[in-house]
Image (tube, rainbow, N blue to C red):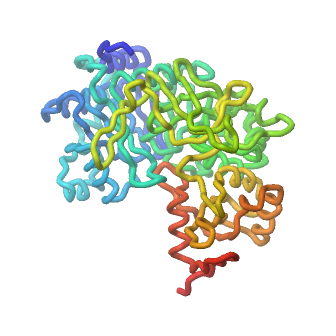
Amino acid sequence: MSNMPIAWSSSLHTLAQRFGEDIAAMDGQANTLTYAELNQRAHTLAAVLIAKGLVAGQPVATLMPNSVDAVWVSYGVRLAGACETPLSWSYTLDEIDWCRQLASFKHVVTLDQRAEQMVTLGLSWIDAREPNLASMRLPPTSIVATLPSVPAETPGRLLFTSGTTGKPKGVLYTHGARWQGEQLLKASLPFVPARGARILLMTPFVHGSSLLTFAWLDHGGTIVLHDGVNVERISPLLESDSLAAIFAPPTVLAKITNALAPKQFPSLQCIFTGTQPLTPALYQRAHAMFGPKVRITFGKSECVNPITILDRQDTHDYFTQAEVPPGACVGWPASGVEIKIEAPTSEDQSHGEVWLRSPHMSAGLIDANGFRPHTPDGWHDTGDLGYIDTAGRLVLTGRVADVIKTGGYRVNPDEIEVALASNALCGQICVTSLASDYWGEIIIAVGEGVQNGWEEACEKLVAGMSKHKRPRLFVAVATLPRNPQGKISRRQVSRHVLETHILNDGQYPTLHPKAH
């Protein structure tokens, strides 16, 4: 990887000169941000941070809701050469404090409604709505001083893992790796966004939405940033044919297809998806609504998108074959990315733990014991299970940490969830386990928003599986616990079941709701 300094400031100047008063971003509150305003506000924030004595690589946290403000704040922190440390707007005080302990940031760019919390934690907060930062409307020809380029090896971004297997860890990227990741994402887009082309982003800006923002805006497009999935607001956008693309992880895609079927929106060019397995049933619903427009990528906090890519036609071909194999096919490695399978299982030597190496990968992880770099040869254990199929594509089959040990067998809960995904009598189903003296662990299926007969439907769907893989108990909940990134934590689901039910262990275990 080249150690040339990263010219964040001059690159943003160029965008402002090219696209000026074109709209860079708009949000669900009808706020807009032009390229000229993006340039001005980002450089103003950078100047404020530098005036506070910031040195290159120093962590600066951002705590912003999905809005146009989140966009220029993110650009501004990196222009200053800081290590941008984005926090989810939904984080609790304890979660923010944990992130502060890991990252050691002292400054937070946020809004006044979170100011009291920042003061409680002893942090210096910068108001993103302060007039000198947020209210400047200058013509595109206004002169904004160019800031120095940033050393590539300097810490540039600190993300946090989803925390589904314990407390979140910090994932540290250099400015150089961050730049390379953005170039790879741009180069692998399925088409070059036209000037003014719109992409709808509904997930938290701190992860996938921000990555697509940087790639999209480099082409002069427009991002439409909504805070969550509000079908009443999304439907008019889709019906107006004003969108070129949307970013919709499977949970988002499921909500849209459930709410808007049987409408069709053939003008959309691409649906970017990832973060969770896409089931054949959900693909068929998406295809009926949009056509063959779904594009799958694989990314992780430790190595952001794209690690692998399954483009639109490839996705369609995979999900329309006579028999779709179990697991989640995420496509072929992106340019420069290496994938290998280590520690194969005894049952199938082709399956094992997925390792990867890439020039845009993070430098290492930060936990309670401090910074832990990746191995000297650059390989990283993803914690995912999977295999390389005969076509060279990566197929994910689960997480190492999620494997259930029951009755002497090792069971992958993802395999069971895929089998249950077509159950039309409930929303999403989470397969997890409860500790058992008799079985070691008891496999349970927890259904969200269930209807009568859902348990019998589940039992029919898994009837062809080995007996030890079938859920022994079924639990209905109104909503499944999710983390700030929208992912379901099996550990939290198990905890919720035990908090609300009494387990009678044994050869034939039972669950009974606790009395209120």
What's the residue at 40%, 22% (across, down)? Answer: 179
Q: In the image as oriented, which residue stretches furthest toward the right? A: 322
Q: Where in the figure is residue 67, as x and y percent of width and height?
A: 42, 42
Q: Is residue 4 left or right of residue 383?
A: left
Number of numbered discs present?
A: 0
Residue 44 seen anywhere in this rendered image of the structure: no
Q: Is residue 510 above or below residue 43?
A: below
Quadrant assignment for the N terminus:
top left
Q: Where in the figure is residue 255, as x and y percent of width and height?
A: 65, 51
Pick whichever, 215 or 19, lies toward us: 215
What's the residue at 34%, 33% (across, down)? Answer: 373
What's the residue at 69%, 40% (across, down)? Answer: 348
Residue 78 seen anywhere in this rendered image of the structure: yes
Q: Is residue 330 left or right of residue 401?
A: right
Pick whichever, 20 or 176, lies toward us: 176
Q: Where in the figure is residue 18, as x and y percent of width and height?
A: 42, 14
Q: In the image as oriented, which residue stretches furthest toward the bottom? A: 515
Q: Is residue 317 left or right of residue 430?
A: right
Q: Where in the figure is residue 247, as x and y percent of width and height?
A: 58, 37
Pick whichever, 2 or 61, lies toward us: 2
Q: Determine which quarter of the picture holds residue 266.
A: top right
Q: Determine which quarter of the picture holds residue 316.
A: top right
What's the residue at 76%, 43% (across, down)? Answer: 280
